[in-house]
Amino acid sequence: MGSRVITPFNTKWRFMGGNYTGAEKMDYNDEQWRLLQVPHDWSIEQSFDPHMLYGGNQAYLPRWSVGWYRKHFNVKPSSPKQRVYIQFDGIHNNSEVWINGHFVGKRPYGYVSFQYDLTPYIRWGEDNVIAVKVDNTTLPPDRWYSGSGIYRNVWLICTDYIHVTEWGTYITTPEISPDEAKVSAKIQVTNHHKHAIECNIVTEILDSQGQVKGKIENRVTLSGFETGEMEQKTRVLEPELWSPENPVLYEAQTIIYCDNKEVDCYRTPFGIREVKLDAQKGLFLNGSSLKLKGVCIHHDLGCLGAAYHDTAMKRRLQKLKEMGCNSIRFAHNPMAPELLDLCDQMGFLVIDEAFDKWKSLSYEHLYDEWWEKDLEAMLVRDRNHPSVFMWSVGNEVENQGQPSMLKMLEQLVAFCHENDPTRLVTCALEPHNTPISLHDGSIEAKVEHTKLLAQRVDVLGLNYQEQWYEHYRSAMPDTLIIGTETFPYYRGKDNRVKGYLPMNPWFDVVNHDYVMGQFVWSGIDYLGETSYPSKGWSSGLIDTCGFRKPVSYLQQSLWSNQPVVHIAVLHERMKPEHNPSWTMHWKSPGMEDHWTFPEYGGKLIRLVTFTNCESVELIVNDESYGERKLADYPDHLIKWELPYSPGKIRAIGSNGNQKVCEHELTTAGLPYGLKLQADRTVLPADGHEISHVEVTVTDQDGIIVPNQEFDLTFKLHGDGRILGIDNGDLTSDEPFQGNQIRTHRGRCLVIVQSGYLAGELLLQASADGGLQGETRLNIEHEYK
């Protein structure tokens, strides 16, 4: 409908690592360059290098100094007056773009989406060449793994000369009641004609079934080369409200008519929900009190690196949803727009964060010139997402509390309020980025220092400061607090951030109405921010393969409304050198969720049961070790010590006299085979979609064998490829590319990508000793 055509622009790019004089020119010979599709991350394809400068930040993955991309394409005009734009959702970093040898722009910050107008230089119906130079040499880099290249989606957008400006709609719902919701749509329209144009602008509000629930029409006149904005207002009767439990979406469909002809159709998904703060009672969503059960996540996807794949991200979010997670803090940069779409659709509230440090690390030389452009890029792109309820302008920034920092904070917060007055603004503050005198200073000094920061944000965002919440609140009785980063197991104590108190910071949320929620650091293991031999941060609730760790069930027992019980054996397998002292407080004691411990024969073994049930009974080989009540364990860690006996162990959770859930572990026998289980057995023949194949070493009864590791080799038959391979062990230096990997705790992950031919993919696995397994995937052209 209409002349707006949005085309995925990800295929048939040519790539070469290194710097090449003249590569921006149209007639440059790129025939020998590698042909690939984006999203693409060239760093993840390399081998790990322990000698790399700033290696820990970038997971010890080398980065070529510069990479070039080129793409040939043809545009056939559909009308005499057509505009052509290219939109990049993210290039890391320092990108420069040319079309047919003409320079069209640069964007240093690697995390924002941006668009260029190619129209003046397009050769209609002929060969055109887009050239992109990516310079990833800025040092020091980000603290986490950033990746390198065109690592998010690219779009070619063709419009009429009169069209809605990209990200030019702003939908708000200023008044909501059970009977109706008032909807305001601010629409920005651009006229590229030299002369004035009169047109009708019609916006329809569609529900999730596509039914029209509201309609507004305005007749406007735009001068030549003018961009104008108008506000349209309507109402939706008996609105369905968006929430994490009911993530229902509406769509504003804006159509422009000139001379009774449709010239543009622009669609804006949005949600109707009401976010309010009460200084005494905290956060309310749609009139109901809500606690944020959140995690922080970085952008990488494990063995896929920074290259965005919607299927991989959705699988991770599903794991978080299983735990009862209802919110995510983006750390510490704008994410791929598709991730926000998933949060809208799956029901996650989002803190959308613009920056990490302001004037240190890789952004130092960009701040003064680019902060407004980069912050605005995030705000205008993301402001219609119902999942986004709060903006964050920074994380653990330098010189906290100093005049220069406070001035910058005021600027950033005011800019957010100006561009989006409907949302709250915070900044994640951390005690170690304060003056030296406050690192170990008195609590009173910390309170006075924090007051300066709290006065300049809507909500006080605090990293690892739970033990001081009550002091802050006493001094600032109307200030709401959110734990923008919290430890996953331990808690600070007294005046020590690292107090090693085994009390989850969630209890500081539920015990104080003025604390809106917590965001665990981190929800998922990520690459970078480490020291050798590790290649990433290993204290997440989920590992880089997407496998849940035992400690994640502690979080589920605290967050979920569904009955849960889970056995975790306290058993430390990691070597001391893999636990640097500065990261120890983010970790929990070593835990395993299996019952295969031959080394404990005849010895006592310790374990813990995580539950939200009133009581748990533990049974080993039909012998009961009694029932213990959760109320007797204020930290929710029901600990047990008993003689290890191979066989079967069960934990039964009960409420009153009713058994409501159970978790069972069985001792594994000798390795017998390899089990390959794909999360998707049917894929489209599009050369892009992926299936996650979980591989486990099993005994004859199908029980995972967790205490013996095997070197596996994979063979893929058919039109497809192994896109990535991982075992979740961040101390392994095995590459993420190839077809060989060693299992870790008896399992690993293979990510298979479809080709363009319909048929069957056969993935076979083998190991020394005769272990074998396989799985088959169907690749279809008519995919549903």
Image (cartoon, grey):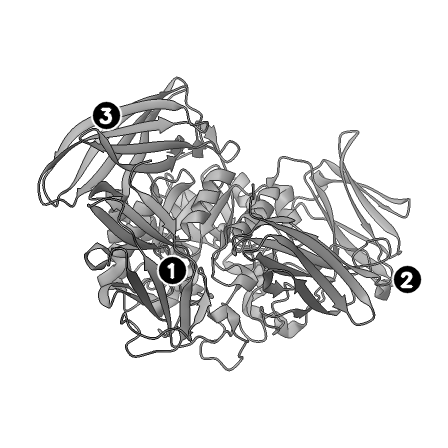
Q: Is residue 348 visible?
A: yes
The residue labelled by disc 2 is 602
Identified at 36% across, 61% down, the residue is: 397
The answer for how far apart the CA atoms under marks 3 and 1 are is 43 Å
Please tell me in which quadrant of the rendered image residue 524 appears.
bottom right
Check residue 217 in the rendering and tell me which mark sits there, or answer none.
Answer: 3
Q: Of circles 2 and 1, which is in front?
A: 1
Identified at 20% across, 44% down, the residue is: 161
Can you give x and y, in whole percent of width and height, for residue 107 in the image? 29, 62
| Quarter in which the C terminus is drawn | top right
**In terms of depth relative to the viewer, which is nearer, 16 or 460?**
16
Is residue 196 placed above or below 703 in the rendered structure? above
Can you give x and y, in whole percent of width and height, for residue 730 in the image? 60, 67
Q: Is residue 489 visible?
A: no
Q: Of helix, strand and loop, which one carries label 2?
A: loop
**In terms of depth relative to the viewer, which is nearer, 450 or 306?**
306
Is residue 652 placed above or below 206 in the rendered structure? below
Q: Of circles 3 and 1, which is in front?
A: 3
The answer for how far apart the CA atoms under marks 2 and 3 are is 80 Å
**In terms of depth relative to the viewer, which is nearer, 111 or 369?**
111
The residue labelled by disc 1 is 356
Please tell me in which quadrant of the rendered image residue 776 appears.
bottom right
* Label located before the other in sequence (2 or 1): 1
Three-letter code, disc 3: Glu
